[in-house]
Image (cartoon, rainbow, N blue to C red):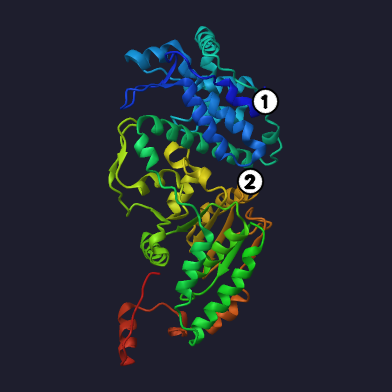
Amino acid sequence: MKFSDYKSTFPQETERTKYIAHSENGKGELQSMKQHCKGVANMMKSFALSDKFVDMYIYCGIIHDIGKYSDGFQKYIRIGGKKEPHAKWGAYVSINEKLINIAFPVLGHHAGLPNRDAMFEILDSCKNEESKWYSIQHSIEDDSVLIPSCDNASFNEIESNTTKELFVRLLYSSLVDADSLDTERHFQEELYDSRPKQVLDVDNLIAALNSKLGSFSLTSPLNKLRTDVRLYAQELAKEPQGCFSMTLPTGMGKTLCSLNWALHHAKAHPNIKHIVIVLPFISIIDQTAKELKSIFKDADVVLENHSNVIYEGKGSNEEEYYCKDPKQLATENWDYPIIVTTAVQFFESLFSNQRSKCRKLHNIQNSIVIFDEIQTLPVRLAECTMNMLNDMLHLCHCSFLFCTATQPNFQTRSDFKGIDFIKPLVKNPSAIFAATKRVEFYPVADYQPLSIDKIVNKICEQNDSALIICNT
């Protein structure tokens, strides 16, 4: 059977629900296994990285909950009692079909992405429960559901093991989000319908930004220099997707310059759906988000996701969850045009195995990610982080921009495996630093250590105002 025909594996139900995926919602409606598997598979299809991977995404959506066909789970969902694990059976089928890339996400779609040893330990236990597996198979056949075959060739063509691991994470993220959304649609349809539906309307956002930029006077040398830098970067926005750098001194308007480039880069590459701005400090985030909101005003395209932003709502289990602010929902999966977040939030999404943190990862594909103050990335984390970003460049149709006044060397070299190539967006940064130089440095005591008393006495001798900064 071809996956293009997969809808036919879910015939229209004409009798009372035989096999239940979720209990009654507020309307007294049950969700059948067919309804849930079909709903998740359809969402997974829309989340797929590209057409060549669609089969795997759909298969993952169909297979993820087949363990709920067990007699034990059906008894639990109807009359209560001990809850029976179900995720391992979809993973068990995947392993038997040599689809290990699907087994990981399926096994972890509730408990978290497992490591290899933990997965095989769990799956080995399935071999001792053959009677339960036969019961599940019988129920699947009784429900007229066919599990189609899945061609894994596209996954096997991925050369790097780390890139394969990234693909598994993306598949996991997509499954977690699709499963959560379809479950939410059943239990809380109004909540599901209230999710934000904003899109990255590049033309309107560019017009709003141009209106802001047009309000600046061009008579001052500094504003003229800012404009020249911005327009040079804007021309390079037409370049193919990849990794870029923007090295500018403080006060040169990196926020607006990088945003202008990002919007024009998105215009040149229609696959781009999101712009993610990653900052190291919450104080900077507050300032950046406030500036962006003032530019785009009523467009409501900026989502803040950090600890200082508290949305009105409450989280508990999936049946009782409610939320009064749709933006709270968007923080779960980053389905929003412009996201302003912390480095911690972003990198946890890349490296964590927890379902709530990984859920947003698939929405980083087809995105532009701007890293402001990239030099704050801890040295001990630099190489593994750049490895991950390099894999994302190859697999996820992303573009990255590193912004800072002191640009680290993150490009691959003999002693560092980093980004393959980083294209600068600033022509001759040293000339810009020289033109905007505002401080002269003079050595005191020929750089020899001085006591606090001696420093104070030396400053007082100058008979002028002074600022002493220590321990930087």
| Disc assigned to residue 2 | 1
Mark carried by residue 258: none
Q: Residue furthest top?
A: 131
Task: Give the camera-side residue of 332 and 82.
Answer: 332
Mark whose residue sits in front, 2 or 1: 1
User: For this view, does 104 lie left or right of residue 333?
Assistant: right
Query: Left or right: 159 with respect to 327?
Result: right
Is 276 located above or below residue 206 in the figure? above
Q: Please identify the quarter of the rendering in which residue 239 is found.
A: bottom right
Give the residue at mark 2: 395
Q: Amino acid at mark 2?
A: Leu
Q: Amino acid at mark 1?
A: Lys
Q: Earlier in the sequence, mark 2 or mark 1?
A: 1
Q: Is residue 326 left or right of residue 227?
A: left
> Looking at the image, is 382 positioned above or below residue 362?
below
Location of the N terminus by quadrant is top right
Q: Residues within 10 Å of mark 1 (few under 14, many from 20)?
A: few
Q: Residue at x 47, y 58 (%)?
A: 277
Q: Pick the quarter of the image with the C terminus.
A: bottom left
Q: Secondary structure at mark 1?
A: loop
Residue 374 seen: no
Instruction: Tell me what residue is drawn at x 44 percent, y 29 percent.
Output: 110
Marks 2/1: CA distance? Answer: 25 Å
Q: Can you give x and y, in whole percent of width and height, for residue 345 in the image?
A: 43, 49
